Image (cartoon, rainbow, N blue to C red):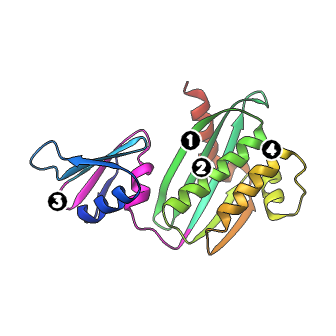
């Protein structure tokens, strides 16, 4: 449950601009409550407490981030194609900024890898980072996105286009293939999402 030190009035304005529903607090100590996506925020005098299944839905809106972030991504598919999930982690100089893991339905392993990269880049963009250093253990995704390999599969071509569109939102980016051991947290998040029915 993240507790964010911030100006509650500024946080309220940002959440309203992002489409959150905001209402008065339930007690004399609560200034307001807001809901956005799968998260709820409760504002006090100098802090906002975020709760819910996906706190990043709100923290990404109200926290100030800039500079560089490392994006780790991994996709998993059981059956290839089969039930699939994604995992991603954002890491800055201060440690883990955010992470997530979600089921994505039926997909191949390569499709899940692309979807994981998209989810990680969308999160980095929501948080307002200017530069991304991306790391993943899918050589296929790394080589296709960087242009070293062709993308012949129509579904993967579409996903590659989406990744390239997201990369244009950043001032600078790099994409590096890393061993699975370096990417273990994103891998864990994808597999945990698959295990949780």
Choose between 10 and 82: the one closer to the eye: 10
- Mark nearest the camera among 2 and 3 is 3
**Tag 1 residue:** 101
Magenta-colored span: 44-68
Q: Quarter-wise, where is residue 109 in the image?
A: top right
Give the side of residue 176 with respect to residue 105, left or right.
Answer: right
Circle nearer the N terminus (2, 1) = 2
Choose between 12 and 104: the one closer to the eye: 12
Local SS, label 2:
strand
Magenta span has 16? Answer: no
**Tag 3 residue:** 45
Q: Residues within 10 Å of mark 3 (few under 14, many from 20)?
A: few
- Mark nearest the camera among 3 and 4 is 4
**Tag 2 residue:** 88
- Mark nearest the camera among 1 and 3 is 3
For the residues labelled 3 and 4, the Cα–Cα distance comes to 49 Å
Label pair 2/1, CB-CB below 8 angstroms: yes
Q: Residues within 10 Å of mark 2 (few under 14, many from 20)?
A: many
Circle nearer the N terminus (3, 4) = 3
Circle nearer the N terminus (1, 3) = 3
Circle nearer the N terminus (1, 4) = 1
In the picture, the quarter occupied by the C terminus is top right
For the residues labelled 1 and 4, the Cα–Cα distance comes to 22 Å
Local SS, label 3:
loop
For the residues labelled 1 and 3, the Cα–Cα distance comes to 32 Å
- Mark nearest the camera among 1 and 4 is 4
Give the side of residue 161 with respect to residue 29, left or right.
Answer: right
Image point 78% across, 36% down: which residue? 108
Local SS, label 1:
strand
Marking on residue 155: 4
Circle nearer the N terminus (2, 3) = 3
Give the x, y percent position of residue 10.
29, 65
């Amino acid at each position: 449950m993240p507790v964010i030190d911030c100006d509650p009035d500024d946080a309220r304005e940002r959440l309203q601009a992002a489409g959150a529903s905001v209402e008065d607090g339930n007690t004399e100590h609560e200034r307001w409550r807001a809901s956005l996506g799968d998260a709820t925020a409760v504002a006090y005098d100098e802090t906002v407490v975020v709760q819910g299944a996906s706190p990043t839905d709100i923290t990404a809106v109200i926290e100030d981030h800039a500079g560089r972030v490392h994006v780790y991504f991994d996709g998993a598919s059981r059956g290839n194609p089969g039930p699939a999930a994604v995992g991603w982690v954002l890491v800055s100089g201060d440690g883990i900024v955010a992470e997530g893991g979600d089921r994505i339905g039926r997909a191949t392993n390569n499709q899940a890898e692309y979807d994981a990269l998209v989810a990680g880049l969308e999160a980095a963009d929501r948080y307002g980072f200017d530069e991304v250093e991306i790391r993943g253990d899918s050589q296929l995704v790394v080589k296709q996105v960087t242009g070293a390999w062709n993308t012949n599969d129509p579904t993967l071509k579409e996903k590659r286009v989406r990744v390239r569109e997201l990369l244009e939102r950043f001032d600078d980016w790099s994409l590096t293939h890393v061993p699975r051991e370096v990417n273990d947290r994103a891998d864990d998040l994808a597999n945990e999402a698959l295990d949780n029915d």
